Amino acid sequence: MSDKLKVGISIGDINGIGLEVIIKSLLDNRVLDFFTPIVYGNTKNASFHRKANNINDFSFNVINDVDQANPKRPNLINCWQEDVKITLGEENEIGGKYAFISLERATEDLIAGKLDALVTAPINKHNIQSENFNFPGHTEYLQSKTNAEDVLMFMVCDELKIGVVTGHIPLNEVAGKITEEAILKKLRMMNESLKRDFWIQKPKIAVLGLNPHAGDNGVIGTEDDAIIAPTLEKANQEGIFCFGPYPADGFFAGDAYKKFDGVLAMYHDQGLIPFKHIASRKGVNYTAGLPIVRTSPDHGTGYDIAGKNLASHESFLEAIFTAVHIVNNRREQAELSENPLAFRKLSKDRD
Ligand SMILES: NC(=O)c1ccc[n+]([C@@H]2O[C@H](COP(=O)([O-])OP(=O)(O)OC[C@H]3O[C@@H](n4cnc5c(N)ncnc54)[C@H](O)[C@@H]3O)[C@@H](O)[C@H]2O)c1
Ligand SMILES: N[C@H](C(=O)O)[C@H](O)COP(=O)(O)O
C-alpha cells in the first residue's frame, strides 16, 4: 500500500480545456512521486482530447474503484460507458451533463474518505444547471454536500491570498450582504485557514472597502464607515489581526497587498480581477471552510482555445500541489497538537 495522497480530479466541461490541462499536468511522471491522481471521466473522451491536442506518449491506467489505483500511474475511473459527442469550444447540454457526472462521482468518493483531496477542472456555470445541480458553482455545491455552515472563496498564489465576503451573487445584491456577521465569518475563516492550511502563525489581514475610495468619509456611500470599520474593531478584539477598510484601487496600485498575509475583498470582481492579473496564470481557487480539501485552477472552460494545445496547465498543476500541501499541513498540525504539554506555571521558589 502506498502512503501517497490520493487526489481525485473531476474533468469539468468536456468541450473545454479541462482534460487538456489535466493531461498536461500529469504528463511529466515525476509529479507522481508526490500524489496518486485519480481522474473521474471516460477513456474515449480522454483519448479524444489527447489526440486533438497532439499529445503523445500518455495513457491512463483504467480502474473501477479508488482501491485499484496504481500509485505509479495516472489513473482514470470510467464514469460512463456510452459514446459521447464532443464538440470542442461549444457550450451545450452534453458538456454540462458529463461535467456533473464526473463531479458527483468524485465528490461521493471524497466524502466517503476514499480520496484525500479533490481538484476540479472548470465547469460552465450555465450548462451544468439541472435538478441535481442548482448552484452557482463548485463552491456552493460542495458546501451543500458537506453540510458546511459557511465557506470562503479563497484565491491563493505566492504573491497574494485574497478571499471574498460575497461570492457568486449579482452585483446589485452585494451592498445588502455586507453585514457585520458576514464580514466576521469570512475573517474568521481566512484567519483560521492562513494558520492551519498555510502555517502562518499570526496572519496580518487587510480588508478592502466597498465603495469607491472606501466611501470618502460618507460622501460616496456609508457602508465603509458604518459597517466595515466597526466590524474590524470587533475582529481585532477577538484576536484577528486585521486592518482597513482600504480603498481597493490604491491598495493594488501601491502594491500594499505585499505587506499582508491575506486580503478580504467585498465582492467577486474586486478581488478576482487583481488576483488573476497578479497570479498570471498560476493562481489557485481554494474553498476554505470545508471539512474536506478542494482546489481548482483560477481559469474557466477556455472554450475559445479548446483542442488547440494552447492552454497553460500551470494553474491546474498548482491547484494539485496546493491541495497536497494543505492536506499535509493539516495532518502534521493535528499530529503535533495531539498531546500538548500540560500548562504549568513556573514558580521561582519551588523545591
Ligand atoms: N472553477 C471553475 O469551474 C470556473 C472558474 C472560472 C470560470 N468558470 C466558467 O468558465 C466559463 C468561461 O469563463 P470565462 O470565459 O470568463 O473565463 P476563461 O478563464 O474560460 O477564459 C478567459 C480567457 O482566458 C483564456 N484562458 C483560460 N484558461 C487558460 C489557460 N489555462 N491557458 C491559457 N489561456 C487561458 C481563455 O482562452 C480566454 O481568452 C464560464 O461559464 C465561467 O463561469 C469556471
Ligand atoms: N470565481 C471563480 C473564478 O473565477 O475562478 C470560479 O468561478 C469559482 O467557481 P467555483 O465555485 O466553481 O469554484
Image (cartoon, helix red, strand yellow):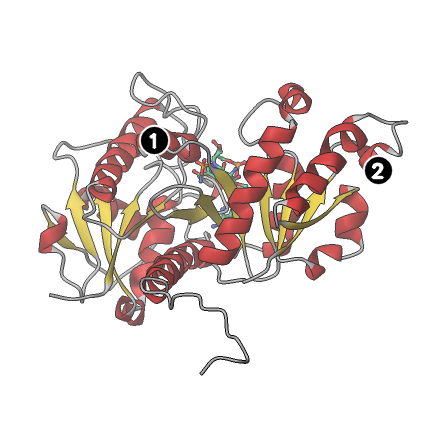
295 left or right, relative to 271? left
Q: Earlier in the sequence, mark 1 or mark 2?
A: 1
7 left or right, relative to 71? right
The numbered mark at residue 128 is: none
218 left or right, relative to 339? right
The N terminus: image quadrant: bottom left
**Observer-nearest residue: 69 or 350?**
350
**Observer-nearest residue: 92 or 9?**
9
Residue at 50% in and 44% down: 299
Give the residue number, with chain letter if any, for mark 1.
147
- Label 2 secondary element: helix
The numbered mark at residue 213 is: 2
30 left or right, relative to 150? left
The amino acid on which the numbered mark 2 sits, given as a three-letter code, is His
28 lies above or below 207? below
Q: Is the CB of the residue bearing disc 2 within 8 angstroms of ligand 2?
A: no
Q: Distance between the residues labelled 1 and 2?
A: 37 Å
Looking at the image, which residue sits at the far bottom? Answer: 351
118 lies above or below 92? below
The C terminus: image quadrant: bottom left
- Disc 1 packing (10 Å; few <14; some 14–19; many ≥20): few
The amino acid on which the numbered mark 1 sits, given as a three-letter code, is Asn
Residue at 89% in and 33% down: 217
Residue at 49% in and 51% down: 193
Residue 310 is situated, as x and y percent measured from the top left of the image, at 46, 53
- Label 1 secondary element: loop
